[in-house]
Amino acid sequence: MKEATGETNMTVVTIIIIGVIVAIATPIISNLMRDTEGKAECLNNGGTWVDGQCQQLSGM
């Protein structure tokens, strides 16, 4: 019985750790995806990405 309780506790700890990792990683990945999307749209539209903003080339 003791072994089963220990295994249950380890399972709970593992689930909590996975939850914490997911909670931390989700916003980071979302921000990276949003930034990558903005850069791709800028480049596809003929601009350049400078200091976190799209710069459109004038005179074209």
Image (cartoon, grey):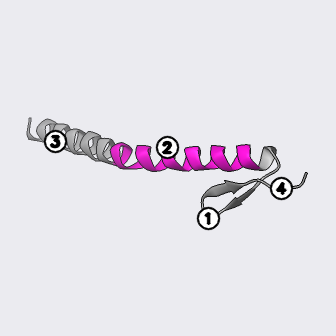
Of the two numbered discs 1 and 3 on the same chain, state the one appearing first in sequence: 3
| Kind of element beneath mark 3 | helix
Label 2, label 4: how far apart the Cα atoms are: 32 Å
Percent from the top left, x then y, of residue 44?
A: 80, 44
Q: Nearer the viewer, residue 17 or 44?
A: 44
Q: Which mark is residue 38?
A: none
| Residue drawn where x is 22% and y is 45% of the image | 13
Tell me the amino acid under the disc marked 2: Ser
Q: Nearer the viewer, residue 50 or 27?
A: 50
Tell me the amino acid under the disc marked 3: Asn
Q: Nearer the viewer, mark 3 or mark 2?
A: 2
Q: Which mark is residue 30?
A: 2
Label 2, label 1: how far apart the Cα atoms are: 19 Å
Q: Which mark is residue 9?
A: 3
Residues at discs 1 and 4 in contact (Cβ within 8 Å): no
Percent from the top left, x then y, of residue 57?
A: 81, 56
Of the two numbered discs 2 and 4 on the same chain, state the one appearing first in sequence: 2
Q: Which residues are magenta?
A: 21-42
Percent from the top left, x then y, of residue 34?
A: 56, 44
Of the two numbered discs 4 and 3 on the same chain, state the one appearing first in sequence: 3
Question: Residue 9 occupies which quadrant of the picture?
Answer: top left
| Kind of element beneath mark 4 | loop
| Residue drawn where x is 73% and y is 48% of the image | 42
Residue underneath mark 1: 51
